[in-house]
Image: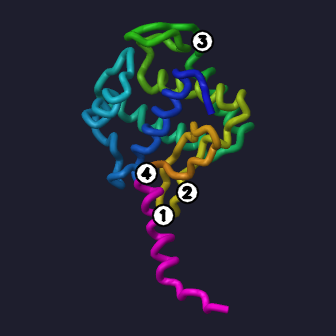
Amino acid sequence: MHFAPDTEETLEFTVALANTAPGASRSGSDDIATVEQLGAFLSRWNYSGRIDHDGAELSDVVQTRDRLRHLWSIDTDDAVDVINGMLREAQALPHLARHDGSPWHLHATDPDAPLAERIRVEVALAIVDVIRSGETDRLRSCAADDCTGLLIDLSRNGSKRFCSVRCGNRVNMIAFRERAASPAPAPH
């Protein structure tokens, strides 16, 4: 699947943010529980615009993360209602922007808007592309039984099942061990 580069980047950011939640993160705990952890996370994604680095912002981003995780578990019609609501709340006005060496891409908030609001609007715009393309089945939960991670399947054939190589390897190893422990079929 191929979306515009900024859409793909936003979808990958969304999955990374969603997978910082307790139970979904590799650590098992909240990976953005502190202002410092949120700052480190954002630095890996080159997020532009206003960043306050305070507790109120952290709380708003954590609430946003939970709203975004919810998008992966609802049907398209319900997702449209959520997306339209996020755009309305922010009074989003889509416009093309180019900054920090990036090519032209879509923004819909002012760079001085609160971080969580900008995240919600950018994700809403990306998911608009997913919905318009009829590709909501690419927004998935990890197929590992013991994982609550989310993923975006950008593969050509739509076969991605796991949020990480680690989950895929773990599931494959469990299946291998189960097959090895099973008695061999009797020869005929």
Name the dominant secondary structure of the magenta segment: helix
Which residue of the protein is positioned furthest toward the left in this rendering? Answer: 36
Q: Looking at the image, tell me whether mark 3 or mark 1 is earlier in sequence order.
A: 3
Which residue does the numbered mark 1 point to in the structure image?
171
Can residue 56 be spotted in the picture?
Answer: no
Residue type indicated by callout 3: Pro
Can residue 42 be spotted in the picture?
Answer: yes
* Residue 119 sits inside the magenta stretch: no
Q: Tell me how far mark 3 sits from mark 4, CA to CA.
A: 36 Å
Which residue does the numbered mark 4 point to in the structure image?
165
Whole-percent x and y of residue 86? 59, 26
* Residue 166 sits inside the magenta stretch: yes
Label 3: state its secondary structure. loop
Camera-side residue: 38 or 174? Answer: 174
Which residue does the numbered mark 3 point to in the structure image?
94
Q: Tell me how far mark 3 sits from mark 1, CA to CA.
A: 42 Å
